[in-house]
Amino acid sequence: AWIGAHLTENWSVEGRYWHLSDSQTGFPTATSVGFPTPSLNSENDSIEAYTIDIDAIRTFDLAGWKIDAQLGARHGSYTADSAFSGGAATPLITYGFGSFASFNGTGFSYGGSIKHSIGNSNLFWVTSARGSYLSGEEHLRSIIANQASGGGGFSGRTEEGDANLTIAEFQTGVEWD
């Protein structure tokens, strides 16, 4: 989604929001992993990402070519997690594996686009390139759990720290205007 306003003939401001979310749940078939009986397994994976941008845009018109140069700020977030768990009835064993990763940061963005009429029509060829450099925090976590009758174990690891994320975008296509 985006919203913008022309400030003058050659200057405008634009705000954008982009969001991606997906998840998948599955039940892998029992495999021979050393258990004497078939096991019931489940797998869950998910991802979510979004960006929020605000840009100042300068437009140039050179011999029928519309050229936009932009500079602005971007906030971005990314989260992905994956979990696999299962168990067997005889002997009683349950197990699980999981991982989680996230990034949340803010920085600057820059880019440009070129637009030109194809022939003498309302159909235009458009191409654009954009880059972003974000600074923020990264969180990583992994878990391994194994519960068997008579005991079991748990192991986990968490890391947090400063991180940087570079995003590169390229688009090309046609537009009816």
Image (cartoon, rainbow, N blue to C red):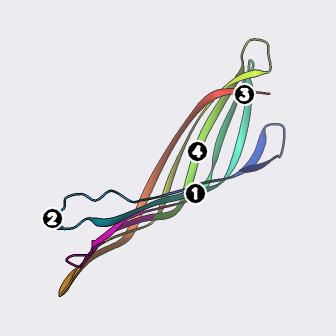
44 on left or right of 90: right
Numbered badge on residue 34:
2
Which of the two discs, 4 and 1, labels the residue nearer the N terminus?
1
Upstream in sequence: badge 2 or badge 4: 2
Q: Are marks 2 and 4 in contact (CB under 8 Å)?
A: no
Residue at 72% of width from left, 16% of height from top?
Answer: 118
Which is more N-terminal, label 2 or label 3?
2
Above or below, 154 against 52 in this view is below
- Relative to 21, does residue 89 appear above or below in the rendering? below
Farthest bottom residue in view:
150
In this image, 143 relative to 162: left or right? left
Q: Which residue is mark 1?
A: 50
Q: Residue furthest top?
A: 119
Camera-side mark, 4 or 3: 3
Q: Identity of the amino acid at label 4?
A: Tyr
- Vertically, is 27 above or below 88? above
Between marks 4 and 1, how big is the CA–CA gap? 18 Å
Q: Is residue 92 one of those drawn in magenta? A: yes
Q: Residues within 10 Å of mark 1 (few under 14, many from 20)?
A: some
Q: Earlier in the sequence, mark 4 or mark 3?
A: 4
Q: Which residues are magenta?
A: 78-102
Which residue bears the numbered disc 3?
A: 175
